[in-house]
Image (cartoon, rainbow, N blue to C red):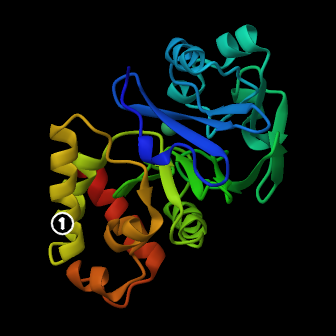
């Protein structure tokens, strides 16, 4: 079986989260509420793997939550809907690009699926209709391709300013929130982060932890928001420490963000 994160299983909220590696470097997550027997999946890179993992646990599938319209996040939508009769949820802005969509959502919308409370956070930048899903009781946020550990998504549709605004929304969640993202890009993100923020000792420590985890074949995520705030340069563009390291003191956070996003594209 693919590796899961046992430490995230069976939290006090009665919600169990199972992160599934799919394709070459994607992650999706199953979220199961035991008392109400409700199960949802965030993104569907691989319908067969998702089905296998559901069946292994004896769970059906009630909802698919979509972060954005890229194929590696929606590929399994129709196959899963056909098999389980699940409802497909995604942003209104992307409703024409999400196959099988039943329910559209907007920024700040609250959802209650079974007994699972979810808050929708619109995060344009990587795509214009990208949304993240925050589960306050489970202390988890699913960030798709907006925020990765030590990095952020490429700007395919939105601007640097939009992306920085989106990342600030995630940054304002409670510190202990665990970030579940759409890809295992952490090791290569760490190289860039260390390159532009070489004096950050917490980042150096995290880089060593990442090497150990990857050598053991383990995922580097989920990761706490607190640790990302200390180490992810894309969350730190308004801090003097990073601005000084880039010789960009006095520039606006948007300008620093746009600069490092461009540097990362060429790194
Ligand atoms: Zn994407």
Up/down of 81 relative to 157, above or below: above
Crowd around label 1: few <14 · some 14–19 · many ≥20 (10 Å): few
Residue occupying image coordinates x 42% and y 81% = 238
Residue occupying image coordinates x 76% and y 26% = 62
Q: Residue 82's image quarter?
A: top right
Residue occupying image coordinates x 49% and y 16% = 49
Q: Which residue is mark 1?
A: 205
Q: Is residue 241 visible?
A: yes
Quarter of the image that includes the N terminus: top left
Rendered location of residue 166, percent (x, y): 58, 62
Up/down of 70 relative to 247, above or below: above
Q: How many marks?
A: 1
Horizontal arrangement in the rendering, residue 231 relative to residue 134 (left or right): left
Rendered location of residue 257, percent (x, y): 41, 69
Rendered location of residue 212, percent (x, y): 16, 47
Q: Is residue 259 visible?
A: no
Horizontal arrangement in the rendering, residue 251 relative to residue 246 (left or right): right
The extreme bottom residue here reads 250
Residue occupying image coordinates x 23% and y 68% = 203
Rendered location of residue 76, percent (x, y): 60, 17
Q: Is the residue marked 1 within 8 Å of ligand 1, measured from its CB?
A: no
Circle 1: element type: helix
Up/down of 177 relative to 199, above or below: above
Horizontal arrangement in the rendering, residue 53 relative to residue 151 (left or right): right
Nearer the observer, 210 or 91:
210
Nearer the observer, 250 or 61:
61
Up/down of 94 relative to 87, above or below: below
């Amino acid at each position: 079986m693919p590796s899961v994160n046992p430490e995230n299983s069976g939290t006090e909220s009665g919600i169990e989260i199972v992160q599934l590696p799919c394709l070459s470097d994607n992650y999706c997550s199953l979220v199961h509420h035991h008392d109400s027997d409700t199960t949802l999946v965030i993104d569907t890179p691989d319908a067969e793997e998702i089905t296998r993992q559901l069946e292994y646990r004896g769970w059906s599938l009630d909802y698919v939550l979509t972060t954005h319209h890229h194929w590696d996040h929606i590929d399994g939508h129709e196959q899963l809907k056909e098999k389980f009769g699940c409802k497909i949820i995604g942003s209104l802005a992307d409703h024409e690009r999400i196959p099988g969509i039943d329910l559209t959502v907007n920024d700040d919308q609250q959802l209650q699926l079974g007994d699972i409370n979810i808050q929708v956070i619109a995060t344009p930048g990587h795509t214009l209709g990208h949304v993240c899903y925050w589960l306050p009781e489970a202390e988890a946020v699913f960030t798709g391709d907006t925020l990765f550990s030590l990095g952020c998504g490429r700007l395919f549709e939105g601007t640097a300013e939009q992306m920085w605004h989106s990342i600030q929304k995630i940054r304002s969640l409670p510190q202990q929130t665990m970030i579940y993202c759409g890809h295992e890009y952490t090791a290569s993100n760490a190289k860039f982060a260390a390159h532009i923020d070489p004096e950050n000792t917490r980042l150096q420590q995290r880089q060593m932890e990442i090497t150990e985890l990857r050598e053991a074949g383990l995922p580097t995520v989920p990761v706490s928001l607190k640790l990302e705030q200390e180490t992810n340069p894309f969350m730190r563009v308004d801090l003097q420490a990073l601005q000084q390291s880039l010789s960009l003191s006095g520039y606006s956070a948007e300008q620093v963000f746009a600069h490092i996003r461009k540097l990362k594209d060429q790194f």
